[in-house]
Amino acid sequence: MIPIETLSPAEAEAALPDLAALLHACVLDGASIGFVLPFALPEAEAFWRDGLPALRSGARRLLVARQDGRILGSAQVGLAGPPNGRHRAEITKVLVHPAARRRGLGRALMLDAERVAAAEGRTLLILDTRADDAGEALYRSLGYAVTGVVPDYACSPAGVPEPCTFMHKRL
């Protein structure tokens, strides 16, 4: 199994090209993760660069799966929240490179994200995913319950509005 590591802000900044390549490959492969085509590599790098302040402030954790120096997967745990929401965390941008899928990386990233959230005292996790996508099946298998489905919530990479499933899990 490929080990999961939590990157420091400095490590994340140094890994920007690899993180951008991961995001770019996933979007080009059809992942509905907030971007539409055309999607250039500099846009992917800008996404990760824009997230560095949240890593520096401690509001977000970035986990990666790396093999032979190459990042094959990532997940983020959002910890920020108002005082009445500091018991929850949001799981975002769970990415597995298309060439590395079906090896258990998504599951490993999710389990480690749950461990990170629990270590931060979070007892409720929330996430969203394209309805009926492979991610939804993974999250269900990990014990996430469907909170609801919103029609036409986000556009696919092709720009077509699609439903989104919101899910939660108590730790």
Image (spheres, rainbow, N blue to C red):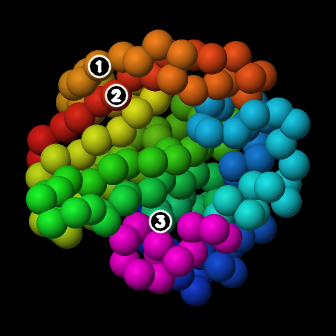
Circle 1 or circle 3, nearest the eye = 1
Q: Position of residue 28 (x, y in %)?
A: 79, 35
Task: Using a 10 Å C-alpha cutoff, classify the residue at mark 3 as few (fewer than 14 neighbours), some (14 to 19) or many (20 or more).
Answer: many
Amino acid at the residue labelled 2: Phe
Any mark on residue 166, and which?
2
Task: Using a 10 Å C-alpha cutoff, classify the residue at mark 2 as few (fewer than 14 neighbours), some (14 to 19) or many (20 or more).
Answer: some
SS assignment at label 3: strand
- CA gap between label 1 and label 3 equals 26 Å
Give the residue at mark 3.
62
Q: What range of the chain is rendered magenta?
A: 49-61
Answer yes or no: do the residues labelled 1 and 3 have beta carbons within 8 Å? no
Amino acid at the residue labelled 1: Gly
Q: Position of residue 60 (x, y in %)?
A: 40, 67
Answer yes or no: do the residues labelled 1 and 2 have beta carbons within 8 Å? yes
- CA gap between label 3 and label 2 equals 21 Å
Any mark on residue 148, and which?
1
Compared with 82, 105 (above or below) is: above
The answer to whether residue 143 is left or right of residue 74 is left
- CA gap between label 1 and label 2 equals 5 Å
Amino acid at the residue labelled 3: Leu
